[in-house]
């Protein structure tokens, strides 16, 4: 009689422990940014960049090349912000936007690194990276292009203000 009671009690404690862990995971997973579920990428990123540069010439805009990855929460956070109405209006008015999958460049498993090199960046230390390029192909934010690895921690207004300043 005691054995079934002890088994039931042990099982109950185990479930309570799992519920507590699940609650903690949910609490730690909460954040203050809109996270894109998928970091949409292309099979031919260089052609996408070329097309964006052509559109930029015709529209008198700059090109924003976001080099990130699906595995990266900072990349998904930035993609989430860029998908909001506020950022979409800015992008529509000032930028041609291209998302480029770079894999894991910091571990030697990088993809599409030739795009960064095309604009004068020899290496990508992490993800995401944001390259702002004029229609003639000049990188205007070489000093900050690789500093976006904390995008999930940045405030919405700070991201927006930086993109506004780079648009002009």
Image: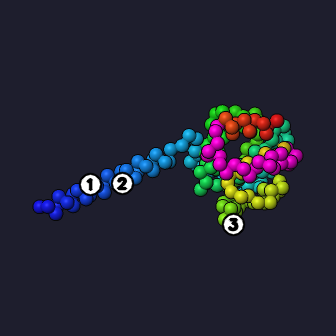
Q: How far, Cα to Cα, is label 2 from label 1?
A: 10 Å
Instruction: Give residue 71's position: percent from left, percent from top.
Output: 59, 56
Instruction: Pick whichever of labels 2 and 1 is earlier in the sequence.
Output: 1
Compared across the picture, whether 104 is left or right of 22 comes to: right
The residue mark sitting in front, 3 or 1, is: 1
Instruction: Give residue 107's position: percent from left, percent from top.
Output: 66, 65
> Which residue is the site of mark 2?
18
The crowding category of the residue bearing disc 1, from other C-alpha atoms within 10 Å (few below 14, some 14 to 19, many at least 20), is few
Question: Image point 40% across, 53% down: which residue?
Answer: 21
> Which residue is the site of mark 3?
108
Which label is found at residue 12?
1
Instruction: Give residue 135's position: percent from left, percent from top.
Output: 85, 44
Q: Residue furthest bottom?
A: 108
Which stretch appears magenta?
A: 135-156
* Label 3–label 1 contact, CB within 8 A: no
Question: Image point 43% across, 49% down: which residue?
Answer: 24
């Amino acid at each position: 009689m005691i054995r079934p009671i002890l088994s039931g009690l042990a099982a109950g404690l185990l479930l309570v422990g799992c519920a507590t862990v699940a609650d903690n995971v949910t609490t730690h997973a909460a954040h203050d940014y809109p996270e894109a579920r998928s970091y949409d990428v292309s099979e031919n990123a260089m052609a996408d960049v070329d097309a964006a540069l052509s559109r930029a010439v015709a529209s008198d805009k700059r090109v924003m090349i976001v080099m990130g990855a699906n595995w990266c929460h900072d990349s998904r956070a930035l993609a989430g912000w860029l998908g909001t109405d506020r950022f979409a209006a800015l992008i529509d008015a000032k930028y041609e936007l291209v998302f480029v999958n770079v894999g894991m460049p910091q571990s030697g498993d990088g993809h599409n690194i030739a795009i960064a090199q095309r604009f004068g960046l020899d290496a990508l230390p992490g993800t995401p990276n944001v390259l702002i390029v004029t229609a003639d192909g000049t990188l205007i934010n070489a000093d900050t292009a690789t500093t976006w690895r904390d995008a999930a921690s940045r405030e919405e207004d700070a991201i927006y203000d930086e993109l506004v300043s780079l648009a002009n």
